[in-house]
Structure formats: C-alpha cells, structure tokens
Amino acid sequence: MPTRTKTSIVQLLERYNQDPRVDKLNLTVGVYTDESGRCPILDSVREAEYFRVKNQASKASFNLAGTIEYQQAVRTILFPTMINRREDSNVQVIQTLGASGALHLVGRLINHYFPTARIWLSSPTWENHPAVLNSHMGGFGYYRYQPANQEQLCMETIFEDLQSARPGDFVLLHACCHNPTGIDPTLSQWEKFADFCAERKLIPLFDFAYQGFAHSLQKDAELFIAFRERLDMFLICSSFSKNMGIYDERTGALTLIFKDTNKLEDWYKTIKILIRSSYSMPPTHGSFIVSHIINDTLRFAHWQQELAGIRNDLQRRRSILFSEMSKFGIIDKVLSYRQQQGMFLCLNLSQQEIDSLRDKQGIYILDSGRMCIASLSIANMPRFCEALMCVI
Ligand code: LMR
C-alpha cells in the first residue's frame, strides 16, 4: 500500500482554523493552555515587560551573540550546580531564535566543520528536526525510540541502532520531555548514553525545549553533569518559549561545551559570522525578560513557582485523563507506556482512527498519534474519551 505523506502541524492548524464546528479541539501544537483555553502570560514575565517599557533608555543593540546578562542567565539554568559559571571557559552561550534557530545554526556548523558527519535522530522525533537541520550535507540516521515496558525506555534498541554511527557523527537527544513520546531516560540511562557516546566518539546534540516540565529546572539539567565529565564536546539547543510561555519572542540559545578552549573560540567566531550573514542580530525583548528574571534571586524564585504550577497542572491532567481512559476501558488499547513527561503523549491509533477523530469528532491530533495534553482541559476529557471510544 502506498504510504501517505504525514500532515504537518502547520497544515493541521490551518485545517483546524477553517473547521466551523464549535466543539472542535486542537491538540496539535505544543502550547500550554489553562482550563479556560487561554495560553497565560506569567506574572513574572509581565513584571519584566512593564519594567522594560518604563526603564528602557535606548533601542540600539549590537550583540550578535546576545548580551552578557542573557548568556549568564542561560548558564545559570543549564549548569545550576556549578559555582563559577561566569568564569567557565569551556562554555559559550549564543542567543538564537528559539531552539529551532539554534538547531538551524548547528546544521550549518556541522556542514562547515564536519561535512560528511551524519546526524542521528530518534524515530519518532519532532517532525521539524530534519527540516531545521537540513543545511548539513552528511544526511540523517535514525535510532528507534520506544518503551521496553509500561515503565521504561528500551535502551537496547537505541544502542543497537547507533552501532552503525561513525566516530564524529552527531546524535540528537531530547534532554527531557521527549517530543513526541514523552518518554525520558532515567539519570542512570543518561550516564550509559554518555559512556556510549564517549566510547564511540559520537557528539551529543541536545534539544532542550522543555526544561522545567519534567521535574524542575535543576533536576532536568542534571544529565549534563555526566556528559561534561565524559565528553570532549557537546551542544545544547534550548528555548524559553515553553517554560516562560514567551512563544512569540523566539528566545533561545545555542550552548557549546568544549574541553578544548581554542576550538571553542574558533566555533564561536564562526557562529558569529553565520549569524551576521543571515539575520545579523537577534531581537532583544525576550532576552531582556529572561535575564531580568533569572539574574535576580527573587524574580527567579517567582518564575520557578509559576513553572511548578504549570508542571503540577500537567501531571494532574495526565492522571485525570488516565483514570478517565480506565473508566471507559480504553487505557490498555490506546497507551503503551504510562510514565510520560511534559506536554505530549502518543496514542496507539491507526491512521484511519486519527482521521475519524478529526473528520467525525472535530478532534485534531498529529498523524503520529501525538496529542498535546497541555491543550486538553479537564472539562473536555470525558468528551475526548468518548470520541476515542467511537473511533477505535
Ligand atoms: C511542537 O512540537 O508542537 C512544538 O515544538 C511547536 C512547533 O513549532 O512544532
């Protein structure tokens, strides 16, 4: 049978927007909405914006890689246990247009420094990964990413597939809240990953778009300790879109962690040339919000409290949804794993069932079966389960 091309998130959003049904549900894109369906602006963010409007003295800005304050804020949350973060000469932070902007730069950097290297992606992964990384020439490899049982990720299949990676290849890893499955390695599994990459001379490339959505800002970054100990170099692409809810500010970072400081300096120079020759300078509103909050102890604590509220709400939604699914007797049919983190979970549905969910029930999830639990209100859960019952 010919395989159908997957409908992208953007195409689904267009279809959803044109759908006239009033009870339609959009569970496609990863956006957190509250019980009323609104994507809230955090108080800590509002305060930072008011402060800026009142106090900004000039709009002249010429920091290709972002301000020192922004770079400092990123270091603070990526390496929370390091004491002398500011003087850490093995790390360089570059402001980017979200994590996608960082990934795009990485694609170009790999092309520049390692034109024949492959990038290994999890299967499944975020649908846009191959596209944003596409400027590299070496091509992609894929490693299977699936549960071993109801509780844990299957590391054996991952390592089996990565046996074919060559030294110098890059492995894209989701640091937490894997998109789309929501399944994350444990800390000891991350240590095995770090050992594996060090032994085979593979270069880890982290997509860290959901820091703070699994356990806490600090705990979600703990895996990097093992990678810093074992690896000569690795890269982190991170974003404040989700954890600060500043989706429209496109505020992210590319962080380079290199043992060799000369090499680090060389990459940093190249990145600045790539930035200058593409979009010239990054915007400053989002990066101001981030540094204003994180570089001040009280504001930082306030934001973490707000983020914990979102995280707890997602955990609550997940457990309510699971008990609704149990009530309807469908949980074993639709879920193969019960320990997901973050905004998403993947349902075991056929393409026909996913199509019926959209066409007959007005409920939009991705072709991969990914649904965004962060956009499903508790009030809508019984209706969602009834709709699942009708299509399976
Ligand atoms: C998602 O996976 O839904 C998010 O990363 C948003 C996007 O741009 O796709």
Image (cartoon, rainbow, N blue to C red):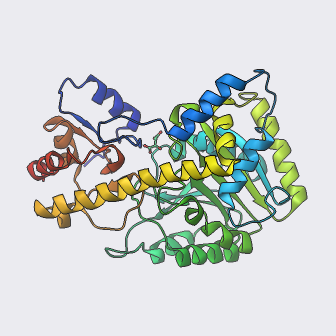
Q: Is residue 210 above or below residue 292?
A: below
Q: Where residue 94 sits: x, y (%)? A: 74, 44
Q: Is residue 99 above or below residue 330?
A: above
Residue 177 appearing in the image:
yes
Tell me the residue at 69%/30% (across/down).
Answer: 284
Q: Is residue 177 above or below residue 38?
A: below
Q: For the C terminus, which image quadrant? A: bottom left
In the shown orientation, is residue 385 left or right of residue 254? left
Tell me the residue at 70%/55% (across/down).
Answer: 76
Q: Where residue 124 sits: x, y (%)? A: 42, 56
Residue 110 appearing in the image:
no
- In front here: 119 or 277? 277
How many numbered marks are there? Answer: 0
Write down the quadrant of residue 219 in the picture. Answer: bottom right
In the shown orientation, is residue 96 left or right of residue 145? right
Q: Where residue 365 sits: x, y (%)? A: 29, 44
- In front here: 340 or 315? 315
Write down the quadrant of residue 65 in the picture. Answer: top right
Tell me the residue at 68%/35% (across/down).
Answer: 288
- In front here: 103 or 170? 103
Quarter of the rendered structure image containing ligand 1? top left
Q: Where residue 174 sits: x, y (%)? A: 53, 58
Q: Is residue 31 above or below residue 331?
A: above
Q: Residue furthest front?
A: 298
In the shown orientation, is residue 241 left or right of residue 315? right
